[in-house]
Amino acid sequence: MMKKVVFLLFIFLSNVFSQSSNDYEIDLKQSLDLVFNFNFKEAENHLSTLSKLKTDDARPLLYLSNIYVWKYIGDKQKADFEKFENLSKQTIERAEARLKVDKNDRWAYFSLSSIYGYRALMFFMNRQYIDGLWAAKKSISWTDDLIELDPKFYDGYLWRGIFYFTLHQVPSSVKGILSIAGLKGDIKQGLKDIQLVANRGNLAKVEAMYFLSQFYSGSLNDNQKAFDLLKELSGRYPNNKLFVYSAAVELIKLHKIDEAKNYLQKIINNNSTEISAIKELSYFLLGDCNFYQNDFSEAVSFYNLFFNKYDQSQYKPTAHFRAGVSYYFLNNLEKAKANFERSISINSKISEDQFHQRYAKKILSSNFDSTILKIFYTWNFVRSGQFNSAIKQFDEILSSKIDDDKKIVATYLKGLSYFKLNDSSNAKKVLKEATLINSKNELWAKAFAYLYLARIEFNSKNFTSAENYISKIMELEDFDFETSVKSQAKNLLERIKYNF
């Protein structure tokens, strides 16, 4: 009888502890959802409670740290970086202590892999590159240990995938440093790892989906796949301004301007004070959306809101340039001139800003060259998806007597319009014409023409021809958007080389 009572008591206690463990895991997942939905205060309260409830689990501290990663991505506040530093060290201490008790604790390995991944990300954003590389190396090391222990622990592949993918794309001049640090990139394996977590992960699934969307967008030229992921994420986490903003960016790249405006308006209507910079940048993008639709009155109203609310210099030269173009077509030359001058006066290292500053100088020095301004007006037809209208307008421009600088830009953009219409035959013909035009000042247009010719050949599986066009890009030097164009070309070359 006593044995039966003991047995029943054992079963009862086992069920109690099992239920308690399940409740803890559910609470942890719900707390993480609060983080992803930018409900930071509520998330912090829940995670602090869980951290005290289970003092040998590093995950609550890991996700408390994650709050400050999100905040720092948005607003770059020193206090958030310092708070992260403190919490990340606590996370490491707790996870390492847990492994001394149980050397096979998978979540402890995962916590170490993740926290060093976050540390690398934060160090890179703070321009502490050496610290970032060492943190990345530690993250990959802990990841490899975890995967060796349990290959089916899919969350564990996240940071190895991120680093393999991104480190493969660093300039050749940096690869020597990576080699000294014992780091390497593998773009194909990195993509495979991220896709695995995005499809089969648990706690790391959301982050994997977001990083994967950025890889599709920035490196693999697949904006539709990027948007599909971001649409799902922003639907699940509507208060996450970064997800909503990123979705809007992809819609703009897909030329779906009205849909993008709807997403951006959601951010404007969101009264949350978390990560204010995203809301401020949304005014800039709303200005761009209206500019691309040649709705210049609405464009300048949003650009002016952006100027008043955003206290950093990035993107302001571009916004002032586009405001200047808008005022020109609104027949207000005084304000047009003032905005072009303001664009030129702001210090920015962003290639897009520098490009528009150069054109602001050209417009002012030429006393408002109408052909240049008409090219930008017609370029907006391309950006807003009115490709046939763009082709017609560029034909008009090209039929007039213009110099080679204007001719190469108009020809390239006409070829791009055909490419967007999936008219490969005409796209190839016109883009090739662009590459034959001699222009030292607008070499960027030739580089982009080669890039889209390479993409046409890649899509047709004519890989040798694609490689030939890529080699021509690499021969060009000192042009606008050089880093971006060559990076895209190298990524295309990697896809040919590794067949993905």
Image: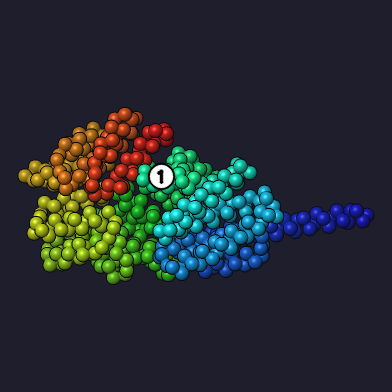
Could you say where residue 41 lies in the image, as x and y percent from the top left?
52, 69
Quadrant in the picture for the N terminus: bottom right
Could you say where residue 274 lies in the image, as x and y percent from the top left?
44, 67
Q: Is residue 380 left or right of residue 467?
A: left
- Name the residue at 27% across, 60% down: 348
Q: Nearer the viewer, residue 214 or 424?
A: 214
Determine if residue 297 is in view.
no
- Name the residue at 11% across, 51% down: 371
Q: Name the residue that disc number 1 marks.
A: 175
Q: Nearer the viewer, residue 126 or 495?
A: 126
Above or below, 436 relative to 289: above
Q: Is residue 337 left or right of residue 385?
A: left
Q: Is residue 61 left or right of residue 170?
A: right
Q: Quadrant of residue 280?
A: bottom left
Q: Of the residues shown, which amino acid type is indicated by label 1?
A: Lys
- Name the residue at 50% across, 54% down: 135
Q: Nearer the viewer, residue 132 or 328?
A: 132
Q: Quadrant of residue 171?
A: top left
Above or below, 411 relative to 89: above
Could you say where residue 70 lies in the image, as x and y percent from the top left?
46, 61
Quadrant in the picture for the C terminus: top left
Disc 1 residue crowd, few under 14, some 14–19, many 20+, Cα 10 Å? some
Above or below, 400 relative to 11: above
Marks counted in the figure total: 1
SS for callout 1: helix
Could you say where residue 158 lies in the image, as x and y percent from the top left?
52, 48
Above or below, 222 relative to 210: above
Residue positioned most to the front: 180
